[in-house]
Image (tube, grey):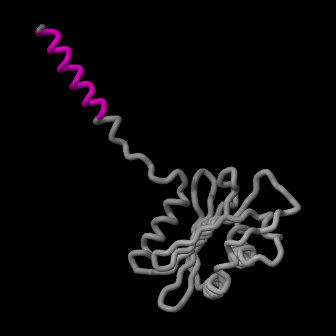
Amino acid sequence: MKSYLQNLILSLIFGLSFATLYGQKEKQKYAFKMDEVAAKFEAGLAKKKVDTIMQAFYFFDNGRGADATKLIFWTEQGKSYVKAIKNAKNNGVKEFDSKECPEFSKMLDYYFENIKDMSSPISKPTLSVSHSYGYLVKLEINRTEFKTYLRNERLVAENHALVEWIKMIANVAKPYIAEK
């Protein structure tokens, strides 16, 4: 009986030691560094009480892809800005400096003028691609959120409010995506 208790106590001590040494590693919150950098930047905007933020994420729908880029737009004290964070090799990031972006004000105006039309169906594209790049857009205004996703080949649809809005975003994103 005495050796049974000793073995039980030793097993408990070993188990607790093992759990303490190996079970306490902090799990990574983000799988990709660009997500972590973007989240920290957005948290900083939230601390400053910025109430209009839009994130446009350009990525390959079957993974990140070499051109994966996050653009963060915001309006602060009457001026609009953009910051880009691009995927880099080995889970690295290329961060671009924040800069003024008057186009964001135009995007917001267009959004509010066409909000009803943005949710209407888009005609089927004549070209169908198995995997493609596209834009995932999340717009937050005073805790109200609008989300949408549109693949590149859908950007050729004619006369659709959502397509035109995403094209406005793509024009701002183009230099960041092309940057190597």
Residue at image position (63%, 58%) is 88
Q: Dividing the image into 4 quarters, which one contains the C terminus? A: bottom right
Residue at image position (31%, 35%) is 21
Residue closest to the far right = 126
Q: Which residues are magenta?
A: 2-19
* Quarter assignment of residue 84: bottom right
User: Is 32 above or below relative to 177?
Assistant: above
Q: Locate residue 134, reporting x and y percent.
A: 71, 63
Q: Is residue 9 visible?
A: yes
Considering depth in this image, is 30 or 62 the residue closer to the camera? 62
User: Is 71 above or below relative to 30?
Assistant: below
Q: Locate residue 54, reporting x and y percent.
A: 56, 74
Residue 89 placement, left or right of 14: right
User: Is 76 above or below relative to 11?
Assistant: below
Magenta-span inclusion, residue 155: no
Q: Locate residue 75, reporting x and y percent.
A: 52, 84
Residue closest to the far bottom = 78
**Tag count in the figure?**
0
Residue 102 placement, left or right of 51: right
Residue at image position (78%, 69%) is 155
Q: Locate residue 38, reporting x and y percent.
A: 52, 66
User: Is 161 above or below relative to 89?
Assistant: below
Residue 8 placement, left or right of 177: left
Residue closest to the far left = 2
Q: Is residue 175 visible?
A: no
Magenta-span inclusion, residue 13: yes
Residue at image position (53%, 72%) is 145
Q: Main secondary structure of the magenta part?
A: helix
Q: Dividing the image into 4 quarters, which one contains the N terminus? A: top left
